[in-house]
Amino acid sequence: MKRVLKSIIALTLVVLVGCNSSSNTNTNKGDHLSRIKEAGVLRVGLEGNWQPFSFEKDGEIVGYDVEVAAAIAEHLGVDLEVIPTPWDNLFLGLDADTIDLVINGVDVTEDRKKTYDFSDAYLYDKAVLIVLEDNNDITSFEDLDGKTTANSIGSTYMEIGESYGAKVEGVETLDQTLEMLKNGQVDATINSDASYQDFMKVSGGPFKTVDETSTYMGIPFVKGGDNDSLIKEVNATIAELRSSGKLKELSLKYFDEDKTEPYGK
């Protein structure tokens, strides 16, 4: 994997200074995997500011999702181009074929499965309801009716809030949601337990979690036979990472716990 990780460093630096992403175009119009192999590059979109999934450290984009992306690129025998992209543009890039894969802790939901196919699960998490530590009015998701939350537009967490009757203020990062909560601009926020726990280790704050629901994450693909062979190879990579223990190793490295199996298993 060292060869691929080196290409991450080089290509990330190119992206960070604003170069446009390369385009995977060739004569293999009907097979996405063939186009990737002919181009020699796997273009992966991720936020790049969502620790510990993907974040900048010493001028590089690192994180759990970056290492999973690197393993997939290595399995395919191509280089990796990391493309930091705001959450609400990731699926647009996937649809427009300016991104080959979105590897960004995407929760698999019934609604998303209507539009996209998904890889096998590569991480299990929880969506947690977060409030100020002195808030005794909100103790469950049901208490969000008529309240305000802050979350990324189009995220699973925004959908959960709205499903319980909350008005959701759209923001871009976890840090922003917690800053708004701390300042009293919203009543609560819903976020990934993995990223929230990481935030609390680094920054702390006057927060507590009061409810949770289990989620699992996969890699989305535009529906259609064009992606059948690519899905097969991505799933093969995930299976290899799981059977070798590497997936668990990465989870322990970035989350301090094994999040590669369903909760309760």
Image (spheres, rainbow, N blue to C red):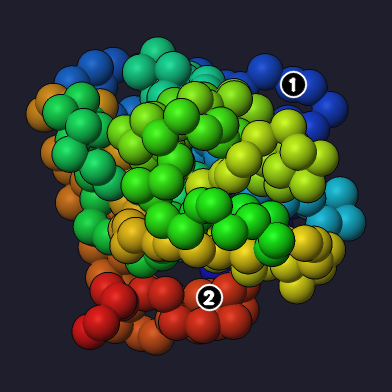
Q: Is residue 96 above or below residue 253?
A: above
Q: Residue at x 51, y 75 (%)?
A: 251
Q: Nearer the viewer, residue 7 or 168?
A: 168
Quarter of the figure that contains the C terminus: bottom left
Q: Is residue 263 above or below residue 73?
A: below
Q: Return the mark for residue 19.
A: 1
Q: Which residue is mark 2?
A: 250
Could you tell me which secondary element the residue under label 2 belongs to?
helix
The amino acid on which the numbered mark 2 sits, given as a three-letter code, is Leu
Could you tell me which secondary element the residue under label 1 belongs to?
loop
Q: Residue at x 69, y 55 (%)?
A: 132
Q: Is residue 96 visible?
A: yes
Q: Residue 9 at what x, y percent from top left?
A: 74, 51
Q: Residue 10 at what x, y percent from top left?
A: 75, 45
Residue 172, quarter of picture = top right
First of labels 1, 2 by sequence position: 1
User: Is 259 displayed left or right of 132 in the figure?
Assistant: left
Q: Residue at x 88, y 56 (%)?
A: 58
Residue extending farthest to the left is: 225
Q: Is residue 51 visible?
A: no
Q: Nearer the viewer, residue 169 or 226?
A: 169
Dot 2: within a 10 Å radius of its alpha carbon, few (fewer than 14), some, or many (20 or more) residues? many
Q: Residue 190 at what x, y percent from top left?
A: 51, 47
Residue 222, quarter of picture = top left
Mark 1 touches mark 2? (CB < 8 Å): no
Dot 1: within a 10 Å radius of its alpha carbon, few (fewer than 14), some, or many (20 or more) residues? few
Q: Is residue 97 above or below residue 234?
A: above
Q: Is residue 256 above or below residue 37?
A: below
Using the numbered discs, state the Cα–Cα distance from disc 1 to disc 2 in whole angstroms.
29 Å
The amino acid on which the numbered mark 1 sits, given as a three-letter code, is Cys
